[in-house]
Amino acid sequence: MAWAVWFTGLPGCGKTTIARRTKEHLSRMGVKVKILELDEIRRVVTPNPRYTDEERDIVYASLAYMAKLLCDAGVNVIIDATANRRRYRDLARKLVERFAEVYIKAPLDVCMEREALRKAEFAPKEIYKKAASGAKVPGVSVAYEEPVSPEIVVDTTTLDPEGAAELISKKILEIFER
């Protein structure tokens, strides 16, 4: 039976990098996974994003439902999305029978430094700089609600992306495959 794991954390904490490396680790272990990267999906669901609360509700509900459909079809899923409100992640937990949450933890100042340097394919650029001009950015001008009881917590100030991916892969197998 398939599972879904939601990688959450502030923008710039390392979610996408760690999600991709986790997929590589799992693949080497014979576990197939599809990554649902919100920044890529958002381009289809809301091609001209306004980042309003209503829009976020729609985007995150759509993402949770996509994960449910993939799991129902037997596909393991990593969801790569900030999901600044717990209710977004809780909806996925409610929809997907085998679900876990991974909190990619890093202080805001570290996330801001990383985000300024990242060369992400789909993520919007300079979001923290835009927050100074009034853009709604989780952790700055919009609340980020940390997970209450995530199944996995990774502190990216003490683990590099490779170490984090290795740890997460092992824990995923412990939770779902054993």
Image (tube, helix red, strand yellow):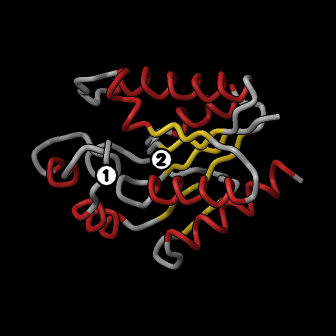
Q: Secondary structure at mark 2?
A: loop
- Residue 138 lies, in percent from the top left, at 34, 46
Looking at the image, which residue is at 24% across and 40% down?
A: 136
- Image quadrant assignment for residue 77: top right
Q: Residue furthest left?
A: 133
Residue 16 drawn at (x, y percent): 45, 52
Q: Which residue is mark 2?
A: 145
Q: Are marks 2 and 1 in contact (CB under 8 Å)?
A: no
In the rendered image, the residue lying farthest to the bottom is 158
Crowding at dot 1, Cα within 10 Å, few <14 / some 14-19 / many 20+, comes out as few
Q: Residue at x 34, y 63 (%)?
A: 111
Question: In the picture shown, does residue 169 fall above or below 81?
Answer: below
Which label is found at residue 172? none
Q: Nearer the viewer, residue 41 or 64?
A: 41
Label 2 is placed on what type of residue? Answer: Glu
Quadrant containing the C terminus in the rendered view: bottom right
Q: Which residue occupies the foreground of this view, 109 or 78? A: 78
Q: Give percent across and percent down for residue 167.
A: 67, 68
The quadrant the N terminus occupies is top right
Residue 75 versus residue 141 in the image, above or below = above
Disc ID at residue 120: 1
Q: Identity of the amino acid at label 1?
A: Ala
